[in-house]
Amino acid sequence: LHRQCWEARKNTLGEMHPDTLDCLNNVASAVCDQGNYAEAEMLHRQCWEARKNTLGEMHPDTLDCLNNIASAVRDQGNYAEAEMLHRQCWEARKRTLGE
């Protein structure tokens, strides 16, 4: 159903609309919940790039995507990369939202 929602929103609102990107994020999370971590990482990266282009690199929704990428990377056993991504997200959130 998440994929259907994503496709419908792409067709009606466009690929870069924030609501469409919310659906993409939901698809990626559902894929991750099913244990397909590599595909989830790819989808989260796609969402992250789109949100950076539409909302900006420091927007909280964009940073949520970065955190989701880190989690998918961690779930694949790439702990060093996951830590680096989590730290990058944490530092950006501190700059954006404050400590």
Image: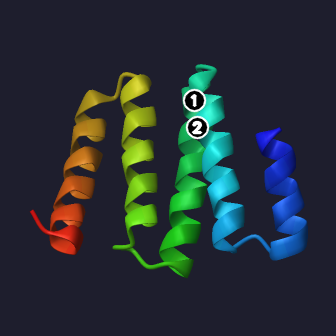
Are the residues flagged by discs 2 and 1 in contact, CB closer than 8 Å?
Answer: yes
Q: Nearer the viewer, residue 97 or 89?
A: 97
From the viewer's perspective, is residue 50 above or below residue 47?
below
Distance (Cα) linking label 2 and label 1: 5 Å
Q: Residue at x 29, y 39 (%)?
A: 81
Q: Is 81 on the left-hand or right-hand side of 57?
A: left
Q: Position of residue 21 (x, y in %)?
A: 65, 62
Q: Secondary structure at mark 1?
A: helix
The colour scheme of the drawn protein is rainbow
Q: Percent x, y for residue 56?
A: 44, 79
User: In screen coordinates, is 78 left or right of 45?
Assistant: left
- Around disc 1, counting alpha carbons within 10 Å, would you say few (fewer than 14), some (14 to 19), or many (20 or more)? many
Amino acid bearing label 2: Ser
Query: Which of the numbered marks, if any, corresponds to residue 13?
Result: none
Decide: is 34 above or below 52: above
Instruction: Give the labeled residue for mark 1.
Output: 32
Residue at (69% x, 53% y) in the render? 23
Name of the residue lying farthest toward the left:
99
Residue 62 vertical placement versus 31 (above, below): below
Number of marks in the rendered image: 2
Q: Quadrant of the N terminus?
A: top right
- For image coordinates 72% across by 64% down, the residue present is 20
Amino acid type at image mark 1: Cys
Q: Between residues 54 and 98, which one lies in front from this camera angle?
A: 98
Q: How far from the left and from the top, in percent, is residue 96? A: 23, 73
Q: Quadrant of the C terminus?
A: bottom left
Residue topped by disc 2: 29
